[in-house]
Amino acid sequence: MFSLGIVGAGQFAGQFARLWRLHPGVGDILATDLMGERAARLVAEYDLAGTVPSYEAMLDSDVDAVAIFTQRWTHGPLVVKALRAGKHVYSAVPMAVTQQEIAAIIDAVGDTGLTYMMGETSYYHPATVHARDQIAKGAFGRLFYAEGDYVHDMDLGFYDAYRYSGGENWKATASYPPLLYPTHSIGGVLGAWQTHATSVSAIGVIDERGDGVFDRSVSQFGNDFSNATALFEVDGGGAFRTNEFRRVGYPSHIRESRFRFFGTDASLEQLATVSLWQDKNGVEDITAHLLPLTTLDADDPSLAHVAPALRDSFTSGSAPVHDRSRLPAEFATTSNGHEGSHHFLADDFVTAVNTGSLPPVHAWAAARYTLPGIVAHESALNGGTRLVIPDFGDAPSR
Ligand SMILES: NC(=O)c1ccc[n+]([C@@H]2O[C@H](COP(=O)([O-])OP(=O)(O)OC[C@H]3O[C@@H](n4cnc5c(N)ncnc54)[C@H](O)[C@@H]3O)[C@@H](O)[C@H]2O)c1
């Protein structure tokens, strides 16, 4: 059993605080936030052990691990500090926003031997789980092409979320570059297909809404792309294409990540409400097998701080394709989220810390889900120039 410090008590942290509070493998849980009242509220809502005044105080405390739920561009340096202070780390996505930050995390994990896990929800997306199972059985034949899309329009909850997250200057951060949040599209593909991206060419679409978001003069990231498409070459032959769309007529409350896999013998295609398995003879509708059931009402008090349009993502439970047999009994009746992924992510981290094993999305996998997006953004900024993607290799065996 280990003790845990939650860092960043905003909109997302509560979903995981609730699960780790229930998990028999976790002891005391503390919380900290730059806005102290948010940490206090998290502690009260989930009956945690208490607050700590700052991140530095958290690292000075005797917690064994930290879980980082701060804004998406902040993770890299916080993670390295925690590892160097001797703490295991769970990090919300993305891993980091530069190659140098990723390298520093890999070095720190290598030097310390501590657990690092990135909480990539799409690793447990039902289509990814199904593709992973079918790849293991060889059912696709030779897999040679895949597609991963993270299609989430700004109007569907992100304006509210960024206002909550960014305060008065929220427009400066709401322009976060889509390709620097690449893990829900890339991770869903590579969570199934055991390869990695070696080169990329990407196209960014300059925003035309004219509301000050995705305006280079306002953007903290100098970014005016709101949609982007990237084509990656993979090791072993073949390619995958991802879309990161923030201005798109698509019902992201029904589906925000969608995947397709094509092999020489079979293919899997997913739309908003339909999932199909196909081979040279015909089509099998596998929608029901991949459908996560809703486990939490959208008006549940735990969702009070989540933008209304985002609540659907936090309420979905498991799909039939999910094998829940390894999860703690305490999770059986509690809410899940993001297509049934939260229970598995929370449990993966606990298992990794308590047994010293590598979690599925360890630092080397996280790098392969994150760095291709960073290089793709660079390609898009250079008119689609094809760029080589460095690779940090496989995880060393433990
Ligand atoms: N599907 C998914 O995997 C998914 C979904 C939602 C959010 N996320 C990720 O979760 C993370 C958190 O998202 P959110 O919506 O809760 O963000 P948020 O802005 O609502 O909350 C972040 C909180 O972190 C605090 N914070 C920032 N820096 C800090 C520091 N140094 N020390 C202590 N507190 C600090 C802020 O004050 C804020 O309260 C983001 O990285 C996001 O990408 C992932």
Image (cartoon, rainbow, N blue to C red):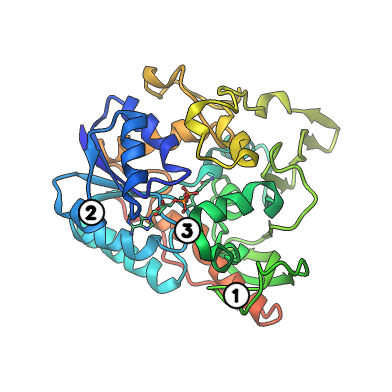
Q: In the image, residue 231 lies at what x, y percent?
A: 69, 65
Earlier residue among tags 1 and 3: 3
Measured as percent of width and height from the top left, residue 371 is found at 50, 66
Contact between marks 2 and 3 (CB within 8 A): the answer is no
What label sits on residue 362 in the rendered view?
none
In the displayed structure, would residue 190 be above or below residue 269? below
Q: Residue at x 32, y 61 (%)?
A: 78
Mark 1–mark 3 CB contact (< 8 Å) = no
Mark 3 CB near ligand 1 (8 Å cut): yes
Give how far apart the Cα atoms at labels 2 and 3 are. 25 Å
Instruction: Judge depth for marks 1 and 3 and give the one in front.
Output: 1
- Packing grade of label 3 (10 A; few <14, some 14-19, many >=20) is some
Tell me which corner region of the image, top left, top right, bottom left or bottom right, holds residue 351.
Answer: top left
Disc 1 designates what residue?
218
Name the residue that disc number 2 marks: 113
Distance of label 1 from label 3 (alpha carbons): 18 Å
Q: Are marks 2 and 1 in contact (CB under 8 Å)?
A: no
Q: Position of residue 141 (x, y in %)?
A: 68, 43
Q: Helix, strand, or loop for circle 2? A: loop
Q: Nearer the viewer, mark 2 or mark 3?
A: 3
